[in-house]
Amino acid sequence: MRHAFSFPVEVRHAVREFVEDAVTKVSGKSFRQEPSYVAALMGRLVGIAYDGPYGFVELKPVIVDSRTAEHWFGADFAITADIRSREVAVLKAIVAQAKRGSLAELPTGERERLIEQVRHMRSYTRSPKVMLIPESGGVRRPTIISGVRLMGGFETKPVDLSDYFVRRVLPTLDGDTRPGFVEAVQESGLTQLRVRARLDATS
């Protein structure tokens, strides 16, 4: 079941500022390696972005901390968004693989590996994402692209991380609402997800 939230400017501004604050406070100089940078950024994104008269928005990122889990699932992290308006409440999980640099900078072999990781994610959830981490003048501005479009060979325009949350996550256009999936990605080792996948394969 799909939902479309329409929040007033106050909520959209609060969510944008929350994400921008996280991006600004995680320095590329302090976290040069991709895994440490992503972990630091996700740590900053944990919390309540808005709690007021128009609703409630909380982000709960989880880093996939097992190399084995990342290999078969394909994702570096998952973000669960708890979004509530006055009338409706939705819990959604977005999963993504992170890559340092822009898409154009990826060597052919790395791009092919990324597409394979997207295929793994796609086998578990409908709309996996890729977070690109380009750097200019020592400043990193994470962006989000569609994993499905990348996998299909279609052009995909990167969207700034804060814009992505406001345009796609806040109105709950992106994300997986299946309760079992959302629950499974709360645990960094993804043990529940693998168990569910095995049960589905044998049923």
Image (cartoon, helix red, strand yellow):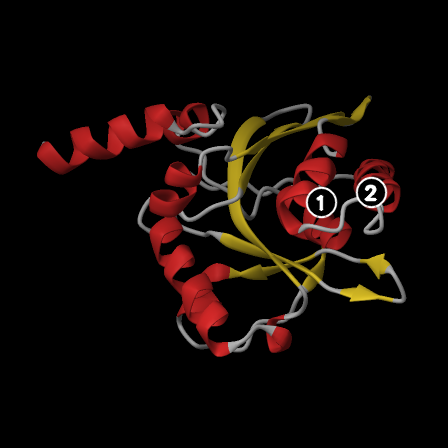
Going from N to C along the chain, the mark reached first, 1 or 2, is 2
Q: Label for residue 132?
A: none
In the figure, residue 158 lies in which quadrant?
bottom right
Side (left or right) of 84 relative to 119? right
Q: Circle 2 sits on which residue?
A: 26
Residue 16 in the image, given as x and y percentages of width and height: 82, 44
Q: Which residue is mark 1?
A: 37
Q: Is residue 56 left or right of residue 61?
A: right
Q: Amino acid at mark 2?
A: Val
Q: Amino acid at mark 1?
A: Tyr
- The image quarter in which residue 195 lies: top left
Q: Kindly check if marks 1 and 2 are in contact, taking CB atoms under 8 A apart as contact.
A: yes
Please indicate, yes or no, whether residue 26 appears anywhere in the rendered image. Answer: yes
Q: Where does the N terminus fall, quadrant-wise?
A: top left
The crowd level at tag 2 (other Cα within 10 Å; few <14, some 14-19, many 20+) is: many
As drawn, is 39 to the left or to the right of 49? left
